[in-house]
Each structure stands twice: as structure tokens, then as C-alpha cells.
Image: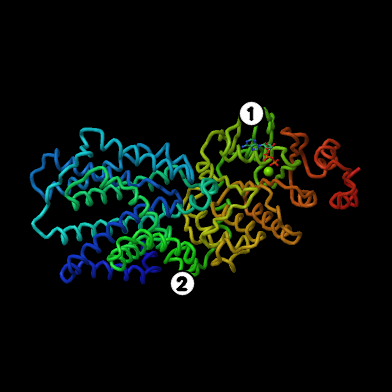
Amino acid sequence: MIRLLRQNWIAALGTLAIILLLAAMPAVATPFLLRVGQTILFGAALAIAWNILGGFAGYWSFGNAAFLGLGAFAAGIFQEHGGIADPQLRFLMSIFAGGLASALLGALIGYPILRLRGTYFAIAMLGVALVLSELSSSVDLFEGALGITIDTVTDIAPDVYFFYAFLVLAVVALGVAAVVRYSRLGYGLIAIREDEDTARMLGIPTERYKMLAFVLSAILTGLAGAVYAFSLGYITTSSVFRTDLSLNMIVYSLLGGMGTLLGPVLGAALMAFLTQVVLGDFLQIHMMLTGAIIVLFVFVLPKGIMGALPVGPRYAGEDVEAGNLALVSSEISPVERGESSAGFLSVRSLSKHFRGLKAIDGVDIGISKGSISTIIGPNGAGKSTIFNMVTGYLQPTAGEIWYKGSRIDGMATHRLSERGIARVFQIAKPFHGLSVYENVLVGALFGRSGAYNPTEVAVAALKLAGLMPLAGELASSLPVGHLRRLEIARAMATRPQILLADEPCAGLNPTETREMMDILSKIRNQGTTVVLVEHDMETVMRISDQVFVISAGKLIAEGEPRQVASNPAVVEAYLGKPLETSGAMDDLDQKGTLS
Ligand code: ADP
Ligand code: MG
């Protein structure tokens, strides 16, 4: 938090100044301006809450009005039946009831609904809002069809009173969002947005994090709904379960800058100013102009107002000198005793069937500690499927997976990362929207459990992959050769004891391939066991201690590279042509090792 303030002191001071100015506003402002202010603060609070899940984690909800409406009704019902006489206390307790009701709803539906991704999640939330809206108008307790009258709270002018209420609400929401954004939770959510599969592999407990963000977003929206209910004085189904408010939250975040802290606030301010102050007298064309503004923004400023400000991706590691390479080696923590060197990682009679297809069929592989082992085999042989099972993305149909003396099949991916297993995917999955440094930092913030300084680890991993000069670049700007190295650096930042790299040289030219091999050798020499999937025979021969050949889901050969290369079954299945034509084999021939 201190570092955060040091880096963002201009924004922090600016925000504080604006909050103080706003607090002084009721003394000078006209009732009209106060109402505009209320609209902005209410909209900002809703958009900030929406942005915690939608902006940070990329889970767009089209139905946050569900939490808004529920919060409003819970507050209304509580003030009516709660039995508290003191109006001030009743007001506060009712607001609290609104937040609580929404939190419960979030906790109840979170687990199933967050399993949906993308549009499915968005639409499901819309459904939740519709169901609740319908319930509120047909269930007697809610009295939504007739409406609930809400008592006046205070003797102060309501305009002023609710201006302050919404101000407190918006400040609380912003505070919560700021803490989330710069905590591990925030980095975890952003990683989920960028690529959820990779996030799991880096050790992020994705289910728990999404749930937390969802419930936080629900609570803040419920609180806003409750305050809103009191400001209206009378609520019905149609005044609080408002689809247009669900959409406004998204629009404000989009216009201001999706996933940024202040974006939702700026978006709310801009839209309220345009619709109420500028267009206030042209009510007939109001919606049309609002629509036109949205379209204009999407075309001209797709990243919103924040995206237009000159703040590039940040590289916060300048002040770190250490970045000792030892930080990303396995030797930083004492190696667990009692591990047998052979079978550090092993799969036994492992099978994976996809309906009729036996993608993997009774495979046994034992990886020795401290080695570089390579799995080779034709396309579709089942190599990636083995990695998917070892890293918890797929459940084996049969067989066992053992790592450091315990069974790991069935374990969640992020738990495996905590235990020191890292993986690089066959298709590069960088976090495009983050800088090179931030990509690696996410790995350093999660991964294998233990005490360490994430910044130093990230720098060490960047150095290992030779990426320090590019630390501040946006990952999306890197060419493929650098992307592959970025993925290795990010995986190594999790401080793994074993690295599974699925075709890390795919798409690389010969020079880049050689560089990649050097990096992998360095990784092994630092104490991390490496398992590769690789096509290029020459590369395999040069780097591997052990080779496993998979063909059509079965292990057809294993051993030292030379033995394997001379195995007729391998020649037949893998190369489909005589080995003598391969350059790598010529080398070996000259050394007289092939008969
Ligand atoms: P390799 O990595 O050796 O090229 P894969 O392990 O990706 O091969 O795939 C092995 C076989 O399993 C292929 O025939 C592939 O189509 C199939 N396969 C892989 N994953 C799935 C899946 N999730 N569902 C169905 N079939 C799959
Ligand atoms: Mg593959």
C-alpha cells in the first residue's frame, strides 16, 4: 500500500482534493447541482463495484441490477419490519441489511454462475436480475407491485443529506477497489481476465478469487441500492430493478477506462454532465445523443478516458538491484529429504480416453530429478494430453501420477503450482494487456509457497530469459521469439522445481531456438528439472538426458537420445523415414555411436 501511494501520489492527492471539494460543495451549490452530484456519485459507486469483477477479472455482468434491487428491497423491508425506532440507527441498519442481502445472493449463486465464461456469464446474470425482479413484484413480502414507502431519515434537507450519503458510498467503493487492485487479489483477477488457464497454472486460486470479487461487487452494489431506496423514499420493482442501470455501470466503465481505478468515476461524471447539464433541455433527443456519444467513444477512444492519458505500462522494478538468479532456482529452499532421484515425477499406467479415442493408453514415464527429459512423437500422439493431466487440466481415465513421493492426480492446478510444478503452454498465452515486467511479476506473486520478495524474483526471472531491456514493453508488442522467452520467465518466476515446456521452440528460427536451449540448460543447471515436448530431432539430441517416444497414445521407446534414435520402431513411427537423412544423426554417426 505504501509503494502504491509512492507510485500514484499524484492520482491519490488529486482524488483526495476532489473528495474534499465535493464535501464542501453543499455549502455553495444549487439544489440542481447537488442532484447532478448525487447522480454522478451514485453512478460512480455502481460502476466502481461493477468494475471490480467486470473490469479487473473480465467477467462482465449484464445484470448487476439484481444486487441493486435486492439491496433496495432488503433495506426497505428492514426499515419497515426491523423494529428499530431511532431513525438514524434504522437508516444505517437498513443500509447494512441491503449490503448483507446482496452478499448472500452473491455467495449463493457465485459458485455455479462463475463457472460460466464470457457471454454466458453476462447473460446468466441478466437472467438472475429478471428472476428477482419478477419475484419482487409477485411475492407478498416484497410488495414490489404496490411499492414500499420508506420513511424520511432526517431533518436536514434531503438533497444535502443524500449527497453526503452517496459521497460516502462512492468513497468507500473506491477505497475497496483500490485495495483490491493493488493486492495479490487484484493481480490475480487481472491475470484471470488476461488468460484464465494460465492464471491457474501460475498458482492463482481462480475460483476463490472470482468468488471474492463477485461478492465484493455484490455488497457494494447492494449498499448503493439501499441508499438509493432511501433517497427515493418509495420503491417499486420498476424503480430499482432497472436494466438501464445495469447497462450504465458498463457504459461508465467503458467510457472512463475498463479495469482502471478511476475510469468508472470519470465515466459516470462525463455521462451525467453530458446528459443532465449539457443535454438537460433537449430531453427528446437525450437517448439518441447518449447513444451517439457511446458509439463515438468506442471508435475514437476504445480504452476510455484513462486510456488516452499518458500513462504507459509501468515497470516498478528499477529500484531493485538484487535480482539474483539464485532466486529462481530450486536451490533457494532446502530440497526435501527422502526424495528418490528417479521418479521425481512419474506417471504409471496413465490413460486418457476421449469418448472412443484413446489419446493416452497405459503410459509409464519416470522423470529423474535434475534432468532434462524430452517427450517426442508425431502430432496428435498425446504429448500435450500428458502435460494436461500432470498439471490438473484433465483428469486421467486411469492410472496414477506421482510427484515428490505423493499422488497428485486430481489435484487443482493452482495447488500443483504451489508445490513447484510450472508449465509453458504449446500455444503462447502471454498477458497481452500487461507489460513484460508485470507478466512476470504475476508469476512471482503466486507460484510455489515460501517467503521471498516478488520484485526481486521477477527481475531475476527476466534476467534469466534475457528480457530485462524489454521489461517496460507491453507484452502484445513482442515478436514471437520474445514471447516464448517471456513465458519461460513467467513460469520460472513461480520458482518451480520442475518445468514442463510444451514445444517452447515452436515458431522460432534456428538462432532463437539455440538461445532457448541455452536458457533451458541454465534452468536445469540451477536445479530445476525440465521436461520438454519437442519436434526438432537435432535439438532433442543436443539437450536431452532422457527421451520418451510416444506414438498413438503409447510409449514406444525410452532411453538416452542415441539409443532411442537408433530404435527401428522410433524411426518407423516418428520420423517415417530413415534416420540417416537427419543432420543430427550424421553428427552422431561421425562419433561412431550409431551402428
Ligand atoms: P500432441 O500434443 O502429441 O500433438 P495431443 O495430446 O494434443 O497431441 O492430442 C492427442 C489426441 O487427443 C489428438 O487426437 C487430439 O485431437 C485428442 N484430444 C486432445 N485433447 C482433447 C480434448 N480435450 N477432447 C477431445 N480430444 C482431445
Ligand atoms: Mg501438443
Q: Total marks drawn?
A: 2
Spot occupied by residue 372 in the image (x, y as percentages of width and height): 69, 47
Q: Secondary structure at mark 1?
A: loop
Q: Amino acid at mark 2?
A: Pro
Please give the label number shown on residue 310: 2
Does residue 427 appear in the picture of this structure?
Answer: yes
Which quarter of the frame holds ligand 1? Answer: top right
Q: Percent position (x, y) of residue 304? A: 44, 64
Quarter of the N terminus within the rendering = bottom left
The structure residue drawn at horizontal position 70% and vertical position 58%, both measured from the top left corner, is 518
Classify mark 2: helix, strand or loop. Answer: loop
Which one is nearer the viewer's eye here, 549 or 11? 11
Left or right of 61 on screen, residue 578: right
Residue nearer the viewer, 103 or 384: 103
Q: Nearer the viewer, residue 591 or 54?
A: 54
Residue that label 1 marks: 355
Q: Tell me if 310 is positioned left or right of 385 in this view.
A: left
Question: In this view of the protein, which residue sits in the foreground, 436 or 153?
Answer: 153
